[in-house]
Amino acid sequence: MTNDKMPVGLSAFQKKIIFLIFSSFSVIALAEQPFTKPIESVAESCDLSFPGAELNSRHFQDVKAADSFKKQAKILIAMSEHEQAVRNHFTKGQPIDWKEVEETDRKNTRDFKKMIEKEGLFSVSQIGGQGVAAEFSLIQRSRDFAFQRNALDMMRRLFARQDFPGDYLAILEDQLLAKDGKPQIYGTRVKPDGSLYPVIDKDQLDARRASRGLAPLRQAICPMSKAE
C-alpha cells in the first residue's frame, strides 16, 4: 500500500495517521519486520452507521484541541510525523534504516512519557482528534511494553468517560495480547492472506467490536480492497 492510493478528501496529516495505523499491525515480537495486512480502515469511505460508531476515532477526528492544550497537540503531531518520516522508504520500495527507526521510537517514548508523567494521557477534549491520533501512534509504536500496558489502563479510564476512541483501545489491547502469544479479543489483526489471527469466542466477536466502536467484521474487511 502506498500513500497515493489513500482515499481522496483527507488532509495530509489524516493520511499519514491512517498509514501509520495500517503499518503498525506487524507482530510486536518481530518489531523489525514490515507490516502485515490490517483489518481496520478509518478511510473517508467507511460507513459509520454501524452500532457503536460513535465510539470510533472517525467520530472524533474533527474535534479541535482546547486552547490550553494546542501546544501539546502540536508537539505530539510533530513527533508522530517524524516517526513516520523515518519509515517512508518502505512506501517507496527502498530499505528502511531500522536502527534509525528504533532510535526514533525510543526517543519518542522517552519524550512522551515526560509529557504525561504528571497528568496522564491526553484526552480528545484536551488535544483534539488529530492530537489523540498522534498520541496513539506514539503509544502503538513504542518498544516499551510496560509503558504500553500502563497507557492501555489510562486509555480505558478516558474511554469510560467517552473521551478517547474505543477503536484505539481495541487495537492496542489486541496488539499486547499478540505480543504475549494470546488470542485477540476484537479481531483487529489479520494475517497476510486475510485470515484472522486467533480470536476468543468468535461467535460474540461483532458484539465486542461494537463495544469499542469497530464495525462488524464483514463490514470492516470490505474497504481493504480500496486501501491496498
Image (cartoon, rainbow, N blue to C red):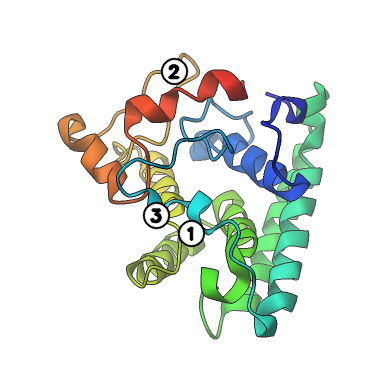
Mark 1 or 3, nearer chain start: 3
Q: Is residue 142 left or right of residue 206?
A: right
> Residue at 58% across / 52% down in the picture?
143
Q: Look at the image and tell me whether residue 99 can be seen.
A: yes
Identify the amino acid type marked 2: Gly
Name, please, the residue furthest toward the top. Answer: 193
Q: Secondary structure at mark 2?
A: loop
Q: Could you classify mark 3 by the number of other residues whose Cα lies within 10 Å: few (under 14), some (14-19), or many (20 or more)?
A: some
- Could you tell whether 109 is left or right of 104 in the image? left
Asked whether the beta carbons under mark 2 and mark 3 sit within 8 Å of each other, the answer is: no
Q: Please state which of residues 11 and 80 is positioned toward the viewer in this rendering.
A: 11
Query: Which residue is label 2 attached to?
Result: 194
Identify which amino acid the numbered label 3 is placed on. Answer: Glu
Residue at the disc numbered 1:
148
Mark 2 / mark 3, whichever is N-terminal: 3
Label 2: few (<14), some (14–19) or many (≥20) C-alpha neighbours in 10 Å: some
Spatial CA span between label 2 and label 3: 27 Å
* Residue positioned 83% across, 24% down in the render: 94
- Look at 53% across and 25% down and name the residue there: 37
The image shows residue 93 at horizontal and vertical percentages of: 80, 21
Nearer the observer: mark 2 or 3; the answer is 3
- Which residue occupies 51% across, 30% down? 38
Q: Nearer the viewer, residue 16 or 6?
A: 6
Q: Mark 1 or 2, which is nearer the eye? A: 2
Picture quadrant where residue 186 is located: top left
Per the image, label 1 sits on a secondary structure element best described as helix
The label on residue 102 is none
Residue 98 picture location, percent across and down: 75, 38
Q: Position of residue 125 (x, y in %)?
A: 53, 74
Residue, disc 3: 54
